[in-house]
Amino acid sequence: MERLASALVLPHPESDVLDLVRLRPHHETEMTAMRVAMEHEEAKGRKVYDVHKENLGYDVTSFDLQTGELRLIEVKGLAAPGGSILLTPNERRVAEDRRDCYWLYVVTNCASAPELQETIRDPARFPWHEVKKVQHYWMDVKAMTGPMPAAGGDDPDGGSPA
């Protein structure tokens, strides 16, 4: 067996910055928020389905058997009393496409005393801020299998600079 390449995976250099720490999903917070949102819907007499693992762009389907109202609910949980919430591109797309029945439920204080904030119908109407900053590095696959350029050379094919 011949080794073609090695990779060293390191943590993001800004992984301790508070803004990035807050963006990491926290399983317990998410599950607490889901429980609170689903209990709220069930208390209203609605039939509730947890669909968060299906990547549909929302977490809960709620159906009122009396009125026929359908709610596609995206649930966001915050461990603290406040903070920022994010929508994935898929969640944002579904929120735009299904404005008639898409809801956002934000549960705060998930780490202590969870509190469902006012539920929001049609969250796409709010001024969401698109995150565009993505830092990455690329390399042509041929660079892993071809000859290595001489140190200090600028030519990716290994030749001398002109």
Image: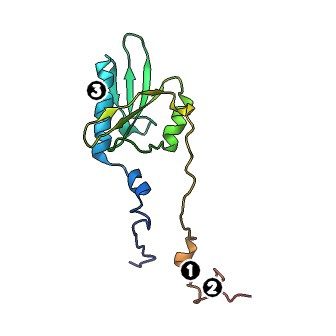
Q: Earlier in the sequence, mark 1 or mark 3?
A: 3
Does the CB distance between marks 1 and 2 fall below 8 Å? yes
Please give the residue where the numbered disc 3 appears in the rendered image.
Answer: 39
Q: Secondary structure at mark 1?
A: loop
Residue under the image location 32 percent in, 18 percent down: 44
- Disc assigned to residue 13: none
Please give the residue where the numbered disc 2 appears in the rendered image.
Answer: 158
| Tag 3: amino acid | Glu
In terms of depth relative to the viewer, which is nearer, 160 or 59? 59
Q: Quadrant of the N terminus?
A: bottom left
Query: Please, is residue 93 above or below residue 16 in the view?
Result: above
Q: Please provide percent x and percent y for residue 139.
A: 56, 71
Q: Quadrant of residue 155?
A: bottom right
Q: Earlier in the sequence, mark 1 or mark 2?
A: 1
Query: Please, is residue 1 above or below residue 95 in the view?
Result: below
Please give the residue where the numbered disc 1 appears in the rendered image.
Answer: 146
Marks 1 and 3 sit apart, C-alpha to C-alpha, by 59 Å
